Image (tube, helix red, strand yellow):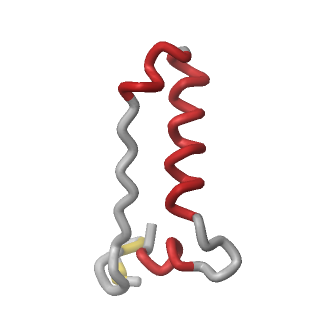
Amino acid sequence: MREAAYRLPAVPDAPARLVAATTDAVVGVLGEGVRSEVVVTVVGVPDGRTGVAGAVV
């Protein structure tokens, strides 16, 4: 995701919510026993370093 998406005024806790939701999704598939082993890294890509259909966006 673009880095700016993590700084939306309407969602000030976006990174924390993404970590929690991703962890819950993994646990939903693999079971509660893996929760303590799930590692989620939220990485923002700066503008100008992402491409779609061969064009930098």
What residue lies at 44% left-to-right and 19% top-to-bottom? 34
Residue 44's image quarter? bottom left
Quarter of the figure with the N terminus: bottom left
The quarter of the image holding the C terminus is: bottom left
> Toward the viewer: 9 or 47?
9
Location of residue 25 (image quadrant): top right
What residue occupies the far right of the structure in this picture? 10
Percent x, y of residue 29: 56, 21
Vertically, is 45 above or below 19?
A: below
Work out whether 10 lies above or below 32. below
Query: Which residue occupies 57% across, 64% down?
Result: 14
Query: Can you give x and y, in whole percent of width and height, for residue 56 in the image?
Result: 34, 83
Q: Using the image as rendered, state which of residue 5 and residue 47 is in the foreground.
A: 5
Q: Is residue 36 above or below residue 39?
A: above
Task: Give x and y (percent) for residue 5.
Answer: 53, 74
10 vs 13: above or below: below
Q: Nearer the viewer, residue 53 or 1?
A: 1
Q: Say whether residue 57 is left or right of residue 28.
A: left
Query: Horizontally, is 19 left or right of 37 in the view?
Result: right
Q: Position of residue 39 (x, y in %)?
A: 36, 38
Name the residue located 34 percent from the left edge and 72 percent from the top edge: 45
